[in-house]
Amino acid sequence: MSNLQSDLPMPIHGTLESDKARRSSTALLEWLQSWVVTVDHKRLGILYILYSIFFLLVAGAEAIFIRIQLAIPNNHFLTAEVYNRFFTMHGTTMVFLVGMPILFGFANYVVPLQIGARDMAFPRLNALSFWLTAFGGMLLYFSFLGGGLYGAGNAPDVGWFAYAPLTARTFSPGNATDYWALALIVSGFGTLGTAVNIIATIFSMRCRGMTLMRMPLFTWLYLVVSGLTLVTITPLTAAQFMLLIDRYLGGHFFDTQAGGSALVWVHFFWIFGHPEVYVLVLPAFAIANEIIPVFSRKAIFGYPAMVAASVGIMFVSLGVWAHHMFTVGMTSVTNAFFVLSTMLVGIPTGIKIFNWIATIWGGRVRFQTPMLFCLGFLYQFLIAGLTGIMLSVAPMDWQLHNSYFVIAHFHYVLVGAIVFCIFAGLYYWYPKATGRMMSERLGKWHFWLFVIGFHITFDTMHFLGILGMPRSIYTYQPDRGWNTLNMVVSIGGFIQGIAVLIFAYNFIVSYFRGDVAGDDPWDAWTLEWTTTSPPPVYNFGEEPEVRSRRPLWDLKHPHDTDWEYEG
Amino acid sequence: MRKNEGGGSVVWGLSQVRQVGRSAVRPVVRPAFRAWLVLAALSIFPGVAAAESASSIPNMMRPEATPAHQIFSLTLFVLLITGAIFAVVAGLLTVAIIRFRSRNSGTTIEPPQIYGSTQVELAWTVVPVLIVAVLFLTTARIIFAIQDAPKPKNALDVTVVGHQFWWEFRYPALGIVTANELHVPVSPVDHPQPTFLKLLSADVIHSFWVPRLAGKTDLIPNHVNTMWIDPHKPGLYLGQCAQFCGAQHAMMLLRVYVDTPTEYAAWVRNQQKPAAQDPTVAAGRTVFETQACMNCHRIAGTAATGTFGPDLTHLMSRSTIASGATTNTPEHLREWIKDPAHYKDGALMPAMQLSDQQLDQVTAYLATLK
């Protein structure tokens, strides 16, 4: 019953309950149940995205607490213990409960529509994956309650990379570390399920005429990301099992007091952790690859090079993990090797940036909110790449590693590039998913406040690192020259907080009061814009057939089609 | 490629990119330019130097030892290259956005569609390859220079042991054990006397970082690391633990005193003496030796031989306590013994529930350990 209705945003009519008095409450329950049991890729995509936005607000609140604590030296707003729990949870949440789920949410929603499919290859695996991820997140946050709310309960306090042997039972009694490991194992299985599903969908569900080299770049990049996810999440899951074996079954993998190796954990973690950065940033590129051409009114420049660069980044990213370990005392030859492999990432990444600029070049740029966020992304990603080159220079890393310079660098990637692209994608596909436009006016407020707050916060952080401020410290001495800069960073944090609240307001209110979008509000070119907004549960009435990378361009310009020019 | 209107513009972009390659292959920063860069780098921190005493700022841009100096020079070179890349790429992007903005929102005419250009794309692949080659070779040179520097015969050996949340310094050749404040002799450029640090950990991973002297190196349990410093100027250099190591990671501060030869000799002579024995504070010593204090702390020449906590033989020769959490005055010492959590919540030293009289006595005793 509910499945027939689910193409409407909120199908509360048609309840089976005949008693009028009980009708509305039953309808609500039916509606809720329809969301819980759904296997529709669009609904699961929306669930992923709503779940991530919720945790984005939570992790943002944690960041605000962190910044209040650090605004002045020797502050007592938070105790050391609570601060350590907050920064651990902020990092873990942003990577595992915001970044990954929201990006897989986009994949869930958009990939089947872009390739002209009616659903993912394995709809029920898709639902299982989402709920595993969701329960992983809930388990992680239940740690705040476990052990009582006072002192932030039993939340993990070992840093998001949880270096051994700090996680051993000797140094981390109680269950905080167990919550961290178990929650990530559970959500990790969800992630693996989704990755398998996306690969299967892209390889086997494409519509007629869509060869691999006619796939939209968005879909291409998700194929790459999903492959990378399969080889990335597995070492983390393995390491977490080893950690739990150490903690409960008397294993000695990382137990240095029994001859185990702390460095083995560091290797395992970064063999996961560095490719993970690309698991997060390639979807951001994917979003930019859709939005920049549409709002520049030009086809993407160098499509084959973009595909090759993405695949290249995937392979190179698997051989660079030890650049997180320049300070652990590797030999000079090993250090030099990882310097070179890391610098090589700059080449395909540079190609991408040049291709985006070339796409804008000669175009007719429209400055709507999705494009504004993508332009912000381009500048910030350029800077993030350049500070990345600085950190790849091992001797510079000996100074800057674990300092606020690194914090600034990876927030430039994670916020300046990835979160900016996520916002761009939300503004871009919101009309498709809801049938309504988000407010342009509030969108511009959101963009400008966010971009100003972002730069106040993260530009300043680079200088704190150069002035010797290490990460993960709950307070600092007043004589180090960090006072003013920290205050500035905190002020920027608040401005970003306000911007995100404006976004949340816009996101909710536009659902009810936004302008009606129509099928194709941005005058775009990929298949998702051929169907209605929101799309029916079966996506397409009849299977589309494509002859080029931009089927809607061909449709709109029958005398100047793409397929005449593509090789 | 089709519709040649855009094609010419892209070739113009190519000539801009090539300029990065030209400036990048010059491996040495010219002295005049370097001075200008230093000035620019320092002027970035407005008011900081004026507002606060500059010597306490652990600023990696003001190096005072060879490893830090070499890293600083390399930093300037890398900043030069990345700055040039930024100027060119961000400039191109800005020009593109401004020049190709939509002026008439009503128009439905699409701009010419350009799908790519093999020559242009090849060019902007080759230029980054050249830049990477230059950067890599320069970097490798500095890595080997710092990491594989030979150890001279006159080098001072110090073993550093990281603890939650304090530093233990052992001078094996001199028979000295101290904590949190490292004393090393100055190492003038004309006749250097570097200090080689052997880095160990008693519990979790820590990291030794004094930015003005050298980059950081981790202290890892079951894994011996080494690093070296050769400070050129006497003075106090601040640093702290740079690897999250638990509750009080933030208060694992580090002070390196670089002494002139005479200061250093005097310090060594004092540290090598057994602890002061003052009969007027015998009551305090009794408290120390009958409570649990002696299980964790060592005072040379007494029954106290513990090794879990800092060696207190010459406690009063140090200017801070609790690894820099506060200054070392008798009042602070008393407060610290009474309730360590007051200064450092999460420190592993327990509050011993001493009476006020015991506190006074033990503080008086410790205050004689000069």
Image: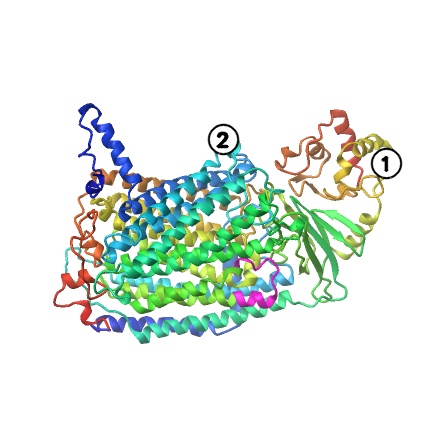
Q: Is residue A481 visible?
A: no
Along the line of sight, the residue nearer the viewer: A223 or A349: A223
When the figure is inspected, residue A99 is found, relative to residue A313, above or below; the finding is above
Q: Is residue B274 above or below residue A279?
A: above
In which chain is the residue bearing label 2?
A: A
Residue A212 circle label? none
Residue placed most toward the observer, A484 or B145 = B145
Residue B93 pos. (x, y %): 33, 62
Residue situated furthest left in the rendering: A559
- Residue neighbourhood size for the residue with mark 1, other residues' Cα within 10 Å, grouped as few (<14), some (14–19), many (≥20): few
- Residue type at mark 2? Leu
Numbered range of the magenta stretch: A323-338
Q: Is residue A60 left or right of residue A8?
A: right
The amino acid sitting under disc 1 is: Asp
| Image mark for residue B278 | 1
* Residue B362 in sight from this viewpoint: yes
Name the residue: 63% across, 62% down: B67
Q: For the C terminus of chain A, which image quadrant?
A: bottom left
Residue under label 2, please give it.
Answer: A149
